[in-house]
Image (cartoon, helix red, strand yellow):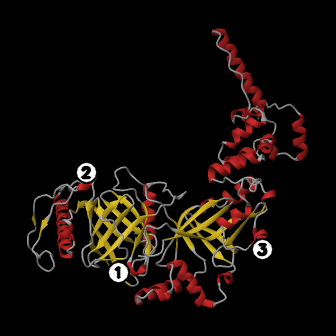
Amino acid sequence: MAVCARLCGVGPSRGCRRRQQRRGPAETAAADSEPDTDPEEERIEAGAAALAGAGGGRGAGPSPPPRCSLLELPPELLVEIFASLPGTDLPSLAQVCTKFRRILHTDTIWRRRCREEYGVCENLRKLDITGVSCRDVYAKRINPRVKSGRFMKILPDYEHMEYRDVYTCLLHRYRHILGLWQPDIGPYGGLLNVVVDGLFIIGWMYLPPHDPHVDDPMRFKPLFRVHLMERKSATVECMYGHRGPHNGHIQIVKKDEFSTKCNQTDHHRMSGGRQEEFRTWLREEWGRTLEDIFHEHMQELILMKFIYTSQYDNCLTYRRIYLPPSHPDDLIRPGLFKGTYGSHGLEIVMLSFHGKRARGTKITGDPNIPAGQQTVEIDLMHRIQLPDVESLRSFTELSRIVLGVREQVRQEQQRQESGAQDGEGHGPQSPREPQPGVELPAEKGGEPVDGEAVAEAAPAPEQPAQSGQGQPFVLPVGVSSRNEDYPRTCRMCFYGTGLIAGHGFTSPERTPGVFILFDEDRFGFIWLELKSFSLYSRVRATFRNAEAPSPQAFEEMLKNIQSLTS
């Protein structure tokens, strides 16, 4: 057994777990009083000694270095070693021997694991001394509207809690729900970020800023929290509504999916009935009252969203989403963006790059284009050279240019298909190259006439963006925009398509448009058929546990969230 222990790097140990399991308490005590010998061990050591003696007859060699057992190290050094191991390995280490098990009760080991693995920085014993009181931690992170009289009743008892309990019963148990999630709320979707916040696990619902202030920071509110009210007992509480935290439940359905349930939905109701609930929701969601919204269609959309979303009562199913992986040759850094969508308000879009194309996938959606669908697709192989500012003010001129590029893309696809059938390949143009100008018959608003050849003009000059300068940009007359405070210079433009559909995602179709890159954090899209402009601004938030394990996992995630609403 000592050989087994030494092979494990522990050294002689008379507390072998496997042997103890085969004995009773009396046999174990008797065995502990006997010398730790084993016939198999003696045979192996005798053979090793014989081999050493035979080797010494042929020539003396250096004596082997003395073996050192972990058991011989001082306890403070073992504490430092054990604290550097992953927390998931510590329970197995506790089964090696009694000494290790006693050392693993040292709370500093588990405190370090909580800090390094989950970012817990609070000191359970010194929250008041360090200048961050329990009251401030609760009031700032959980419920700013909580009344002082109810505070002491719902705050955990940190004085009698250990970091080992925090790690094993809270952090490790609920580690699978950390990260980014999309709730299943029909076409509307959402963005949930589950994080370790202090000594709580909190699910924050991220909301876009109020329409049309696309550059404002994101808003967020807590939907649920998990914490230890008592040792070895985690409590799940629903944070929805305006009457404080109440009893809730979390169930991990399967890998990358979990659900929440509120057990006291009466806490979601308000004394003034549904009208008061709607007015409160409208102020939080839109930052205004219904009287301030004069557009009748917009009022219908807002009322429809309230009725649809409020019926869930925070009983939701969530599916994991990942942030898009980035590559050095990406046009800009991929990620999450806030975008304007007309009467639907601001929505969250994920921009990702896929070789020669970029895609914008809706994380939040609307009854026309639901969450999970690809709202825009950018063809990075076809740059568009915009005309001068005066010519750009003409929507007819912009339509002529874009439709010309669309015709060129269609012809290239036909040549590639025919070339594939004939066994001949046609190499596409290199990406990021400005697309040659196109001369088209000026008929029917600049649309090409069927069967008529398309003549290419001389290549357009290099865009100023390549030399580090911006190109002047202005929206054509007649193109509507929710936000008139858009950038007046752009880096480059590309041909793209946007997805449009009727109410209920009926008759979806991709229509041509222009992708405008303003800077690293903002881009726009002109919907040609809708004569509308969407401005997108980057979500400036840091999300932990949101990286995809592989590019294949990210692609699979996109397919899954799209299939739910197709």
Which residue is more in the foreground, 422 or 165?
165
Asked if labels 3 and 2 touch by Cβ distance under 8 angstroms, the answer is no
What residue is drawn where x is 67% and y is 62%? 200
* Percent x, y of residue 20: 82, 44
Query: Disc 2 or 1, which lies upstream in sequence?
Result: 2
Q: Nearer the viewer, mark 3 or mark 1?
A: 3
Q: In this view, does 522 lie to the left or right of 278?
A: left
Query: Disc 3 or 1, which lies upstream in sequence?
Result: 3
Asked if labels 1 and 2 touch by Cβ distance under 8 angstroms, the answer is no
- Label 3 SS: helix
For label 2, the residue is 467
For label 1, the residue is 501
* Percent x, y of residue 165: 75, 56
Amino acid tagged 3: Gly
Give the number of callouts.
Answer: 3
Q: Nearer the viewer, mark 2 or mark 1?
A: 2
Q: What is the quadrant of the N terminus in the image? A: top right
**Residue 503 visible to the viewer:** yes
What residue is drawn where x is 27% and y is 72%? 475
Local packing at callout 2 (Cα closer than 10 Å; few below 14, some 14-19, many 20+) is few
Local packing at callout 1 (Cα closer than 10 Å; few below 14, some 14-19, many 20+) is some
- Label 2 SS: helix
* Percent x, y of residue 474: 27, 69
Amino acid tagged 2: Ser
Q: Quadrant of residue 133?
A: bottom right
Q: What is the quadrant of the C terminus in the image? A: bottom left
C-alpha distance separating marks 2 and 3 = 63 Å
Amino acid tagged 1: Ala
Q: Label for residue 149?
A: 3
Query: Disc 2 or 3, which lies upstream in sequence?
Result: 3
